[in-house]
Amino acid sequence: MTPLKMALFLFALSAVAIAFSYQGMPDGVLEASLASVYGEEVRVLWQSVPIKPVQKETLRKSFKGKKEIPDSIVVGWIPREDHYHYLILDEAPGKIEKFLYAVYLDQTGVIVDVDVLVYREDYGGEIDFPAFRRQFRGKKEPREVVFGRSIQNITGATISVRSITYGVRDILVLHEAVLESLLPPPPPGRVDN
């Protein structure tokens, strides 16, 4: 194995352990989400990205839903023809329990899809209905993701709708502050399976 291949393997292996530290995500859930979004089996290269102090200050001023700014975020790189898409996993509060969701962004930061991976409550699961999720698609700017305006509420799911709306908005802020300047892994054609 060449040094580059070994480095890529170790990089991917260490980030995968971080990415799947979410408790309670059943086996196969992420794979099913990826297949439903992309219509095919895709692989993900995981990377832990540190958030610099100056970036944290920007995020602190701009975040709407998040109270804590992490020291790093795990980003999934999804190879597409000659570029990459981003995958970010996040948790948001429901009425009692947190739920896990995925945000898929194209190479320019436009939302491809939002998918609820694990929802633990009896009410509010409608946030994973295709008609609701469709409201996020095509949005790039945080100001485009507004609870009650561009993202319509669902009766009986207000807390979950608000939480996922603020969470997705915060991920777009994170993309602007941290991810836009991030260099992706080598182009898809140069990475061996």
Image (cartoon, grey):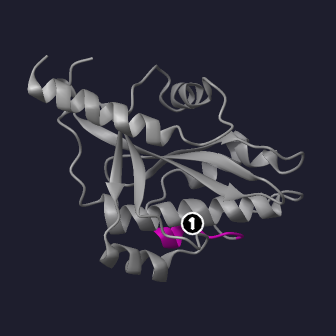
For residue 95, side relative to residue 80 (left or right): right
Rendered location of residue 156, percent (x, y): 89, 57
* Above or below 28: residue 118: below
Quadrant location of the N terminus?
A: top left
Is 142 a magenta residue?
Answer: yes
- What span is colored magenta in the figure? 141-148
Secondary structure under tag 1 reads: loop
For residue 107, side relative to residue 188 (left or right): right
Residue drawn at x 32%, y 33% is 12
Q: Quadrant of residue 24?
A: top right
Q: Which residue is mark 1?
A: 145
Q: Amino acid at mark 1?
A: Val
Rendered location of residue 54, percent (x, y): 31, 78
* Above or below 103: residue 62: below
The residue nearer to you, when weighing 162 against 49, is 49
* Above or below 179: residue 4: above
Rendered location of residue 117, percent (x, y): 65, 39
The residue nearer to you, when weighing 80 against 20, is 20
Q: Is residue 2 visible?
A: yes
